């Protein structure tokens, strides 16, 4: 009896060990097969492995095929041309003489004979004024003079044409669920002047404009 019991125990242990041995190998194989494709997929989709087109503006192969099917002509774009902004011909160009002045709380590029509208100035209509805050000046056939911050010898003379008001801007406020609504309009006080002369010295005394 004892011998038979020992034989049964030995057979049971061997069966369990054999089953574990048979199961362990397929599990490793399945795990290896499942991990390997994932690793290769991660390598293929990694950002470090992606190729970059030498032309930043070039279309992909799929997009180019669609464009060819639709009959869209292929256009080669130089990436260097997209790095610089080209000023259109419709933008007016400055003349040989101009200046940058600070007037009415803003900086304005002025030229002789042109009209400008700024915030209200303390001057009467018809007065000849001088704009003392000249930041930059360019005379004919001369280099650009830059002030730190203003040019002391630069003089820009102008004549006040009229005082006017800007377009009406509507503003308001309300309180929800309180039947409270307020609405009002605002119009800026403006001054229009014409630049008569831009120079660096003056024999006639013209009072400065105190803003």
Image: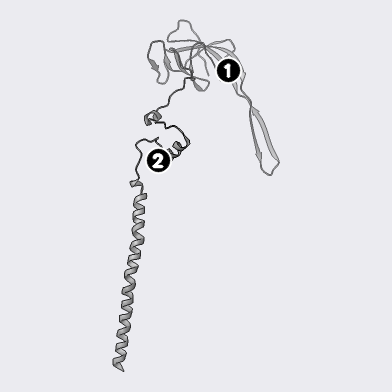
Can residue 152 be seen here?
no
Would you say residue 110 is visible in this rendering?
A: yes
Secondary structure under tag 2 reads: helix
- Crowding around mark 2 (Cα neighbors within 10 Å: few <14, some 14 to 19, many 20+) is few
Instruction: Give the camera-side residue of 14 and 104.
Output: 14
Query: Looking at the image, is mark 1 or mark 2 nearer the viewer?
Result: 2
Badge 1 or badge 2: first in the primary sequence? 2
From the top left corner, tell me how far across and down residue 158 is, in percent. 52, 12
Tell me: residue 37, above or below residue 200: below
Relative depth, front residue between 151 and 68: 68
Q: Is residue 211 left or right of residue 27?
A: right
Q: Is residue 1 above or below residue 24?
A: below
Residue for badge 1: 191
Q: Position of residue 115 (x, y in %)?
A: 54, 14
- On the image, numbered disc 2 is attached to which residue? 61
Colouring: one colour
Horizontally, is 180 left or right of 109 in the view?
right
Residue placed most toward the observer, 172 or 207? 172
Q: Residue furthest top?
A: 203
Seen as rendered, the residue at the extreme bottom is: 1
Looking at the image, which residue is at 34% across and 54% down? 40
Q: Is residue 79 above or below residue 103?
A: below
Q: Local crowd at mark 1 within 10 Å, few (<14), some, or many (≥20)?
A: many
Q: Is the N terminus in the top left, top right, bottom left or bottom right quadrant?
A: bottom left
Separation of residues labelled 1 and 2 (CA atoms): 60 Å
Label 1 residue SS = strand
Image mark for residue 78:
none
On the image, the x and y values in percent for residue 120 come to: 57, 19
């Amino acid at each position: 009896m004892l011998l038979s019991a020992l034989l049964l125990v030995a057979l049971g242990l061997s069966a369990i060990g054999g089953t574990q041995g048979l199961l362990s190998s397929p599990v490793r194989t399945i795990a290896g097969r499942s991990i390997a494709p994932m690793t290769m997929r991660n390598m293929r989709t990694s950002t470090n492995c992606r190729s970059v087109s030498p032309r930043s503006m070039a279309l992909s192969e799929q997009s180019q095929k669609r464009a060819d099917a639709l009959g869209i002509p292929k256009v080669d774009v130089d990436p260097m041309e997209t790095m610089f902004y080209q000023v259109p011909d419709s933008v007016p160009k400055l003349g040989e003489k101009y200046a940058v002045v600070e007037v009415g709380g803003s900086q304005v590029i002025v030229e002789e004979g042109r009209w400008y509208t700024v915030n209200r100035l303390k001057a009467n209509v018809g007065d000849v004024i001088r704009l003392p805050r000249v930041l930059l000046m360019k005379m004919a056939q001369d280099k650009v003079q830059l002030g730190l911050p203003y040019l002391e010898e630069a003089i820009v003379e102008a004549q006040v044409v009229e005082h006017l008001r800007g377009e009406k801007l509507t503003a308001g406020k309300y309180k929800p669920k309180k039947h409270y609504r307020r609405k009002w309009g605002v119009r800026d006080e403006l001054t229009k002047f014409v630049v008569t002369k831009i120079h660096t010295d003056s024999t006639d005394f013209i009072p400065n404009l105190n803003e």
